Image: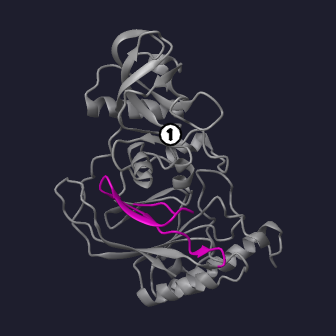
Amino acid sequence: VLSWRIEELGEALKSHHHLEDFSSVLLPAQEAVTVLGQIGCDSNGKLNPKSVVLEGDREHSSGGQIPLDLSELQEYSLFPGQIVALEGTNSSGRMMVVSKLYEVRVFPPPHLMVPAEQRMVLVACGPYTTSDSVAYEPLSDLLGVIARDRPDVCVLFGPFVDAKHEQVENCQLLGAFTEVFKLCLKTIIEGTRSAGSQLVLVPSLRDVHHEFVYPQPPFPCPDLPRDDRLRVHLVPEPCTLDIDGVILGLTSTDLIFHMGSEEISSSSGVSDRFTRILRHILTQRSYYPLYPPSEELNVDYEHLYSHASLPVTPDVLVTPSELRYFLKDVLGCVCINPGRLTKGQVGGTYGRLYLQREDTQGERKSPCVAAQVVKI
């Protein structure tokens, strides 16, 4: 699976940067050569500027490794699992002195249909209970907001039954986990019925009742009335969604936190860590490009390539995180961390987006008219 990704992104790198054929990382070279591979670490510790290695691709390097000397690079941002093309010299065959780093570009904007009317999208991420209670009071407050604002689409991310909640960990709930989830789901569906909102439910690896594997399948479909069946959408984690020609990338996995603890960077100017990480997600064309993954994640590599790749560059990327909420425009994609609906014993935040696709004549232009992170 990793080899497929290296081959695919290698072709994109070669095409965009007009590169000649790649060389082997194992062959000594007095003159500058270009090599393709995946960033790795030479030990079990965290990546640092002295421990960076390039694991070459199979076709040209047979998977061989070479340590990298980054001292000649003025700027870089690297993380384990990142697929890159490098230019440099390898005079001894034992160390590559890197002079240039090529990164993959985002997908070109898709050709779209006639512009649609403006849509309001609400995004919120669990937990939907406070840490000292299993009453879904914050969820009730959110349903009140939905009934008042009547958004066209509500995207709700798990966890809905949080594995990290003390009463869940100690099995102090009054019913089985699946029964608690069904009750929660019923509350959400009934609470959004009057607003008529399209409801999108994204599972989380912290949902104690659901499969603990990434990529994660959708929640099983409950027996719903016909009208609700048309507006309730149970999607996998991660998921790419099309709302009237506006493409949303959705993931409940805290990739910002995972990558933030592994990424290393050097910059001559002011550099924002969130922007760097979001840029990596978009240019690596993957919802989870980090390898090896966080210990919190149980990755199914057979399904990672087909279910966690970015098929297009989204117009909006929603990445809930434990880290502080944010709104950023990165490479023409609006990236939002709406925060979590609860923070310990108090209310947290949710996000609100106003989207309208325009005819941009093949240019990448954000369809996001306005975006907000709102306190609950």
Q: Amino acid at mark 1?
A: Phe
Q: Classify residue 156 as left or right of residue 172.
A: left
> Crowding near pointer 1: few (<14 within 10 Å), some, many (20+)?
many
Q: Give the residue displayed 34% in from the left and 42% down from the top.
A: 268
> Residue 247's spot in the image, x, y percent?
36, 60
Instruction: Work out whether residue 58 can be spotted.
Output: yes
On whether residue 337 falls in the magenta region, the answer is yes
Question: Which color mode does the image show?
Answer: one colour
Q: Give the residue displayed 61% in from the left and 61% down from the top.
A: 204
Q: Give the residue displayed 54% in from the left and 31% down from the top.
A: 40
Q: Decide which of 119, 79 is in the foreground and name it.
A: 79
Q: Classify residue 339 as left or right of residue 32.
A: right
> Residue 351's spot in the image, x, y percent?
45, 73
On whether residue 256 falls in the magenta region, the answer is no
Residue at mark 1: 79
Q: Classify residue 180 as left or right of residue 361.
A: right
Q: Give the residue displayed 44% in from the left and 51% down from the top.
A: 273
Name the quadrant containing residue 51. Answer: top right
Instruction: Work out whether residue 57 can be spotted.
Output: no
Q: Quadrant of the N terminus?
A: top right
For the magenta stretch, what is the residue range? Answer: 317-345
Give the tally of numbered discs: 1
Name the quadrant containing residue 169. Answer: bottom right
Q: Residue furthest left?
A: 361
Q: Is residue 37 above or below residue 190?
A: above
Q: Is residue 355 above or below residue 247?
A: below
Name the quadrant containing residue 30. Answer: top left
Q: Decide which of 101, 188 is in the foreground and name it.
A: 101
Q: Which SS class for mark 1?
A: loop
